[in-house]
Image (cartoon, rainbow, N blue to C red):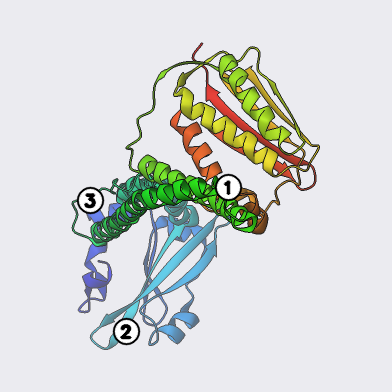
Amino acid sequence: AVADSYEPADSSFNVLHEGDEEENEALSAWIRIVAADGGDIYQTSAMQASGWTFPYARAKRLQDRADFFFEKLVSRSGRPYLAIIYPVWRGSTLVGWVQLALPTEQVTSPLSRLMVSLLVAAPIALLLAGFTGYWLADRALRPVEVIRSRAEDISQENLAARVPVPNRGDELSRLAETFNAMLDRLEAAFKAQRRFIADASHELKTPIAILRARWEQAIDDPKLPQEVRTQLIRDVEELARLNKLVEDLLLLTRADEGKIRLAHEPVNMAELFSSLSEDARTLGAARAQHVTVEARDCGTVLGDRGRLYQLFLNLVDNAVKYSPSGATVRVSCERRDGALLVTVQDNGPGIPPNDLPHIFDRFYRVDKSRSRELGGSGLGLSICKWIAEAHGGHIEIKSTPGEGTRVEVLLPAAD
């Protein structure tokens, strides 16, 4: 404004006329107007009192290279100032300079306030951005968590479940649709497999029964040579093993399809183990083993007595089969935290650690040659696991090679 008010006719500045409102305001500032030859045209009282000289040599040197430049000044009291110096041109002719100085704090204070504001606002902005980002991410990934949670519930026994398909029409929706289509194919394959096993088991039962009846009848023939009789006895034993395998397969297939209805009635466990003890001792006696059953105060379980009996007889049979002659097999039952803990302990060879995770898999054998020799089908423990879980219980096997095996069955108590 000062530069624009220059009047070349009388080499004066209109803004500085006596009584001008701008001059009254400017008097309290540090302003100096300098002619082209370096002489002072005007300066405020504050500028006069400061004692600062105009940097004429530097102004001349920079007049063609910069529109303005800065200069640091210090008052007599040691107060720092910052001055800005503008050249005043009229066309291509330099007519002088305008120098304006301000205390440094007037420049730095707004910057300091801005810095403080930024220091306060930045963390708040970051927190808001973080919460907003978290909310957006959670909203975007919530369907993924729903799909993951539903996928965890899908198993071989529950292939009918499907993951929800988000109504968004994006990649996530297409992924869920593809995953469900894959489950459809898996379910169809498992159903076909179960149907084949069930049909094959049914078809095999009749010819096995006929052959077994014929050979047992032939064995009773007194005219039959001893060599033939011995071979027929072995064949009948193999037929019995094959018949047991077919029955176990049919049982597990029907269990997978949910077609087995279990009784839900009180079962006195002390009475059940009393009945079991006689069969258990018979199994042990055949291999010169001692089987003990301790189950005086076992309480009651709601379930199917026949299936529970099958569960524990299978476990005793396994312990007897894989324990050496003269070994001891112990069966015990005790109450524990509102449940019944049944333990079957043997001192056999034990199970290697690598085999333990697969011990309940169907057709899995730790010692395949010995299992076949003993008549094992590889389905006994799978059936035990199904019976325990069907009664709301849990079965676990703990074993150390060379120290024997401990099987624990935990069943909810009814009393």
Q: Please state, as top left, top right, bottom left or bottom right, where the N terminus lies in the image.
A: bottom left
**What residue sits right under mark 1 in the picture?**
222
Disc 3 target residue: 166
- Give me the residue at 51% from left, 10% from top: 415
Residue type at mark 2 is Leu
In this rendering, position of residue 282 left or right of residue 301: right
| Residue 315 picture quarter | top right
Query: Crowding at label 3, few (<14), some or many (≥20) Cα neighbours within 10 Å?
Result: some
- Left or right relative to 257: residue 299: right
The relative height of residue 339 versus residue 381 in the rendered view (above or below) is: above
Left or right, 395 with reference to 127: right
Whether residue 338 appears in this view of the structure is no
Q: Is residue 240 above or below residue 264?
A: below
Label 1 sits on what residue type? Answer: Pro
Q: Position of residue 154 (x, y in %)?
A: 37, 47
* Among numbered discs 1 and 2, the one appearing first in the sequence: 2
- Between marks 3 and 2, how big is the CA–CA gap? 75 Å
Q: CA distance from mark 3 to mark 1?
A: 76 Å
Residue at the extreme front of the image, as rendered: 223
Q: Kindly state the secondary structure of the residue where label 2 is placed.
A: strand
Residue type of the residue flagged with mark 3? Pro
SS for tag 3?
loop
Give percent across and percent down for residue 364: 56, 53
Is label 3 or label 1 in front? 1
